[in-house]
Image (cartoon, rainbow, N blue to C red):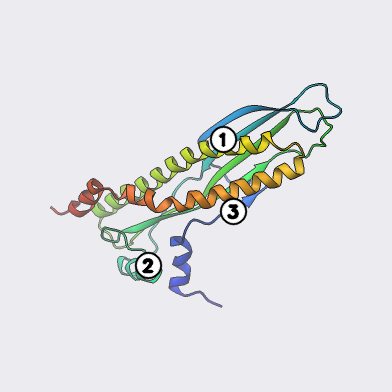
Amino acid sequence: MAKTFEDRLNVRLAAPRRVRSSRQGKQVFAAAFGASILLMSSTGLAACNRPRNIRLQVSTQAAEITVRTDYSIADLARLAGVVSQHPPHRILGFYADTIGFTLDMPALDTDECRDMAIDVKLVVQQRVIELASDLGGCLHEVALEHYRHHAALQAEALAGSGRALQTALAAVVATQSDSGVLKDRLRASVDQWLDQFQSTLPSVRAAADSPSELDTLRDACST
């Protein structure tokens, strides 16, 4: 069944979607944040003479932004009404992306002495700035800069929140020695974190539409 105009665009303006995977895909990303900590687990190691070292790393990666001009100002204004998203400035386009994560960790028996590396990647994919196709040259450049500002603030927020996530995951690692159960609990913790992070995005968008930014958009290309 063919999708309507609203169906096709609603996918891009909806709240960021979540993608979960156990392995990193082949797409090339630019790293935005990364940190690791070394933990020691002394539980459930009946055959070991020492605690197991666990390296936990949480990083964020963001794909390159694609700029598109698929729709007119009238199209985007109509869509804004359909999805009830009304920016505090004239409609020039939008920024959208998909936020997800990957979790990579080995499966170890509780009596194995091998150290363990746990890598969690917070991945921002399908980053798109959609600009109205009928913007003039001057306004096109102003709008592009504005939505790059939106993307940059959201990336900063993700990196900052990722550092808090690492602290939360370290607490999970410290209380669980079974690798299978640990992986499930880590996934559940990241899922919960994603819900919390997405609830902060309206305030991030509001910060991007600051009074000075709104003045710039209002007065741009007026002469």
In this rendering, is residue 10 above or below 119?
A: below
Q: How far across and down, in percent of the image, does residue 52 sit?
A: 75, 27
- Classify mark 1: helix, strand or loop: helix
Is there any visible trace of residue 79 in the rendered image? Answer: yes
Residue denoted by label 1 = 167
Q: Amino acid at mark 2?
A: Ser
| Among numbered discs 3 and 2, the one appearing first in the sequence | 3
| Among numbered discs 3 and 1, the one appearing first in the sequence | 3
* Callout 2–callout 1 Cβ contact below 8 Å: no
Q: Amino acid at mark 1?
A: Thr
Q: Residue furthest bottom?
A: 1
Q: Quadrant of residue 57?
A: top right
Residue denoted by label 3 = 19
Q: Residue furthest left?
A: 223
Q: Is residue 110 left or right of residue 200?
A: right
Q: Quadrant of residue 118?
A: top right
